[in-house]
Image: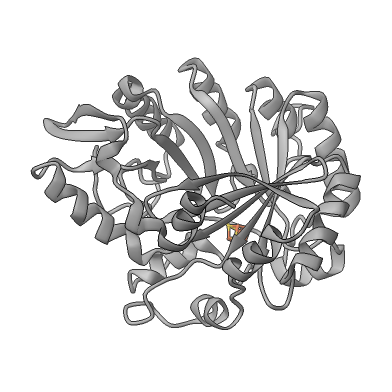
């Protein structure tokens, strides 16, 4: 690997400077911002999830701030859709890419209408992150499945969380129930997705009691390829602030189960089965992409403690104009620059 690539691997956010990227002036509610040119809007559909992963990032983001994972919601659906439209009007000048996330977005009855509204705004680069369990469920009052509706929506990227290639081990790690997701259902989802120009991707967390080595990553990718996948992401457990975190099951697990990507990358550099493709430096995450057989293998590490530091740093560089790194639409109707609905409220 070239020296400048290695520098980025080891220095990471030391080399990140948002002001070197395209920043767009943006005004909302009478306040001026600078927004990252390729900004993403995450529509956080619902905090409900039928899995019980001990590494859940949605929850860890709250515990990291020392608070419980309780998200206020708009219970009146019409009011929610109205706020969604107002928000989409607000962000239109930024033309964000749009990701649907949660919790488990495919189990929320609002999802079909949310898709209709997003489509009517002609949103860009359409993605969903899901554990997959609701994709084959029927939409209420229709014969269509949620996956059919995602195909109608012209979804581009379907990210399915799958912690292990072995069905039973995956069940143990993710605790999916009501409904679970069998391997045969997963294969059907991948087949339908590929037939409908949706690119499915499997997302695997690196943990000591699961996929924890290059050998295991290879097994995972060989299995993924055998069921029609050409795109896998391996994630290191997110770092968090151990001084401020609200103690409990998830931080305890993340503290004891971490697998460090750096030595794995160093092994891949010497492994002829892998070729380095590219690297991406984000404001609190760092990604390396490798090619393995026909698989694009993405590998990512992230550190929650870097987020506030980076935002403070950029505020000095922009003479006090806040930078919007990403947008999150929360279930209570708040549009924020943060994954917490009370922080960096834009509208
Ligand atoms: S599937 Fe995703 S949202 Fe649900 S518990 Fe697991 S990590 Fe959290």
Q: Position of residue 5 (x, y in %)?
A: 51, 51
The residue sitting at 71% across, 33% down in the picture is 199
The residue sitting at 35% across, 31% down in the picture is 83
How was this image coloured? one colour
Q: Quadrant of residue 126?
A: top right
The residue sitting at 67% across, 38% down in the picture is 158
> For the view shown, which residue lies furthest in the front direction?
3
User: Is residue 144 shown to the viewer in this render?
Assistant: yes
Which quarter is ligand 1 in? bottom right
Query: Foreground: 156 or 132?
Result: 156
Q: Position of residue 338 (x, y in %)?
A: 33, 50
Q: Is residue 26 above or below residue 312?
A: above
Q: Quadrant of residue 284?
A: bottom left
Q: Position of residue 77 (x, y in %)?
A: 46, 35
Q: Quadrant of residue 24?
A: top left
The residue sitting at 52% across, 82% down in the picture is 252
Q: Quadrant of the C terminus?
A: top left
Number of callouts: 0
Question: From the viewer's perspective, is 121 left or right of 54?
Answer: left
Question: From the viewer's perspective, is 239 left or right of 340?
Answer: right
User: Is residue 68 shown to the viewer in this render?
Assistant: no
Query: Foreground: 233 or 28?
Result: 233
Q: Position of residue 212 (x, y in %)?
A: 71, 72
> For the view shown, which residue lies furthest in the left direction?
319
């Amino acid at each position: 690997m070239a020296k400048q690539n290695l520098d980025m691997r080891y220095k990471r956010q030391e080399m990140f400077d948002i002001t070197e990227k395209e920043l767009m002036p943006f005004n909302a509610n009478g306040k001026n911002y600078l927004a990252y040119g390729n900004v993403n809007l995450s529509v956080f559909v619902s905090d409900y999830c039928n899995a019980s992963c001990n590494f859940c990032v949605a929850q860890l983001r709250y515990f990291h701030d020392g608070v419980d994972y309780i998200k206020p919601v708009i219970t009146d659906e019409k009011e929610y859709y109205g706020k969604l439209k107002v928000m989409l009007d607000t962000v239109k000048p930024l033309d964000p890419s749009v990701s649907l996330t949660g919790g488990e977005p495919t189990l929320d009855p609002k999802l079909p209408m949310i898709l209709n509204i997003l489509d009517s705004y002609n949103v860009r680069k359409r993605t969903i992150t899901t554990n997959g369990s609701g994709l084959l469920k029927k939409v209420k009052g229709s014969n269509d499945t949620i996956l059919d509706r995602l195909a109608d929506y012209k979804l581009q990227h379907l990210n399915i969380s799958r912690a292990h290639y072995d069905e039973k081990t995956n069940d143990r790690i993710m605790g999916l129930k009501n409904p679970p997701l069998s391997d045969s259902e997963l294969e059907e989802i991948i087949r339908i997705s590929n037939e409908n120009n949706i690119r499915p991707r499997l997302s695997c967390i690196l943990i000591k009691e699961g996929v924890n080595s290059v050998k295991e990553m290879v097994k995972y990718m060989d299995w993924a390829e055998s069921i029609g996948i050409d795109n896998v992401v391996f994630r290191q457990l997110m770092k968090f602030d151990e001084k401020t975190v609200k103690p409990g099951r998830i931080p305890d697990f993340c503290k004891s189960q971490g697998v460090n990507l750096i030595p794995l990358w160093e092994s891949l550099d010497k492994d002829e089965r892998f070729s380095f493709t590219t690297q991406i430096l984000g404001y609190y995450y760092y990604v390396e992409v490798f090619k393995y057989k026909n698989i694009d293998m993405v590998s990512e590490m992230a550190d929650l403690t870097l987020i506030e530091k980076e935002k403070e740093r950029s505020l000095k560089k922009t003479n006090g104009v806040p930078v919007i790194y990403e947008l999150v639409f929360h279930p209570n109707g708040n549009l924020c620059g943060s994954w917490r609905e009370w922080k960096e409220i834009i509208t």
